[in-house]
Image (tube, rainbow, N blue to C red):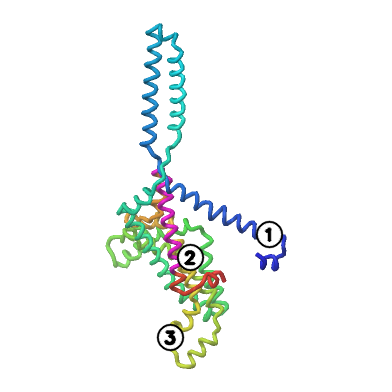
């Protein structure tokens, strides 16, 4: 905090610190606490039904006493019976008020259901693996392009390439995804071209597995891999590469021993970004995934909006969040990158 005060002054420093903590609390910590609380309880229908049954029994007792007063004149003069009827009425009102509210029961059943449901468990791990694969494909596509832009391309070529890459991102993600759906559909450009040249007789179903979803995600999230690697490689001194070439080193060794180690922070952040976006994607797998490419986020959506079970949906979402945090820390460990390097 003292460094912030020295750099920006006391008034602006307090403003920055206040809104930083406000942002962290309101948009990061509080939603997770809220979801964690929701995920740990279920509606206890058995307890609610028990209250209803108890209220019904007391109501039957009250009705019997009231009937006894009407049929037996002696009971009308007995104040104890009237007091008992009034007490039963108060207890019935109390039970009705309790049973009218949702009965909570704190339990880990919402989490147990996920790991006990083989279908949902398989979709969860398949989503994780597919997202890792999308990140790896994006890395293979972006690394040579980022190196070319940062170290090889002329100023004019760099401008043209960046324009060609960035302009499509002026269109929102949903529209770009639907564009790929039209390209890969049975009557799309690819199938029409392959049938025209006689390579196939019937259209290929690109949506029978996750291949179309992989392609769509790589296209949609490619900039999140490209820019972190490019930003790092742009600062790499070209003289190191020239010196290595003069000493007879091959291009493979130059990249293995100079370029890739230098680009590790960019690669790490690119892999993390693309993985996080892919694993949390809903639109792309919904449109391009097909019936066999169900994504875990689709199940979470279904719990919230189709099944109406927010508690189960929160449990599923938190499991995914925890795994993503573990993945981030693992990637930082694998690439031997500190958080300070990533922040730079």
Taking the view exactly as shown, the residue that stands out farthest to the bottom is 247
- First in sequence, mark 1 or 2: give its number: 1
Mark toward the viewer: 1 or 2: 1
What separation in Å lies between label 1 and label 3 (alpha carbons)? 50 Å
Residue 271 belongs to the span the image colors magenta? no
192 up-or-down from 140: above or below: above
What separation in Å lies between label 3 and label 2 (alpha carbons)? 27 Å
- Name the one closer to the observer, 344 or 159: 344
Q: Position of residue 166 (x, y in %)?
A: 53, 66
Residue 178 seen in this snapshot: no
93 up-or-down from 302: above or below: above
Q: Where is residue 113 in the image (x, y as percent from the top left)?
A: 34, 50
Tally of marks: 3
Residue corresponding to mark 1: 14
Mark toward the viewer: 1 or 3: 1
Crowding around mark 1 (Cα neighbors within 10 Å: few <14, some 14 to 19, many 20+) is: some
Q: Is residue 183 left or right of residue 149?
A: left
Mark drawn on residue 293: none
The residue positioned 42% from the left and 57% from the top of the image is 320
Q: Do the residues labelled 1 and 3 touch (CB within 8 Å)?
A: no
The residues colored magenta run 307-330
- First in sequence, mark 3 or 2: give its number: 3
Residue 270 seen in this snapshot: yes
Residue corresponding to mark 3: 253
Q: In this view, does 344 lie to the left or right of 108?
A: right
Residue corresponding to mark 2: 273
Q: Quadrant of the N terminus?
A: bottom right
- First in sequence, mark 1 or 3: give its number: 1
Taking the view exactly as shown, the residue that stands out farthest to the left is 201
The quarter holding residue 249 reads bottom left
Crowding around mark 3 (Cα neighbors within 10 Å: few <14, some 14 to 19, many 20+) is: few
């Amino acid at each position: 905090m003292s460094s912030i005060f020295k750099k920006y002054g006391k008034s602006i420093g307090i403003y920055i610190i206040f809104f930083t903590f406000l942002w962290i609390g309101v948009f990061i910590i509080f939603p997770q606490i809220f979801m964690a609380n929701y995920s740990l309880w279920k509606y206890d229908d058995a307890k609610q039904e028990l209250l209803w049954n108890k209220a019904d029994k007391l109501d039957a007792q009250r009705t019997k006493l009231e009937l006894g007063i009407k049929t037996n004149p002696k009971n009308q003069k007995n104040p104890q019976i009237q007091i008992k009827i009034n007490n039963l009425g108060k207890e019935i009102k109390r039970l009705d008020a309790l049973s009218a509210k949702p009965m909570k029961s704190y339990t880990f059943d919402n989490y147990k259901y996920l790991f006990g449901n083989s279908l949902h468990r398989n979709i969860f791990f398949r989503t994780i693996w597919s997202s890792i694969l999308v990140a790896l494909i994006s890395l293979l596509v972006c690394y040579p392009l980022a190196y070319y832009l940062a170290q090889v391309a002329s100023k004019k070529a760099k401008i043209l390439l960046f324009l060609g890459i960035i302009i499509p991102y002026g269109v929102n993600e949903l529209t770009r995804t639907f564009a790929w759906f039209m390209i890969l559909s049975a009557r799309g450009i690819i199938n029409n071209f392959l049938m025209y040249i006689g390579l196939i007789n019937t259209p290929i179903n690109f949506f029978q597995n996750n291949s179309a979803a992989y392609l769509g995600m790589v296209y949609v999230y490619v900039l999140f891999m490209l820019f972190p690697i490019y930003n790092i490689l742009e600062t790499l001194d070209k003289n190191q590469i020239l010196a290595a070439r003069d000493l007879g080193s091959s291009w493979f060794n130059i990249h293995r021993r100079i370029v890739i180690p230098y680009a590790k922070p960019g690669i790490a952040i690119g892999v993390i970004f693309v993985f996080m976006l892919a694993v949390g994607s809903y639109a792309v797998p919904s449109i391009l995934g097909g019936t066999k490419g169900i994504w875990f986020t689709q199940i979470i959506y279904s719990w919230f909006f189709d099944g109406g079970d927010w508690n189960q949906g929160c449990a599923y979402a938190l499991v995914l969040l925890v795994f993503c945090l573990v993945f981030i820390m693992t990637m930082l460990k694998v690439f031997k990158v500190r958080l300070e390097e990533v922040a730079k």
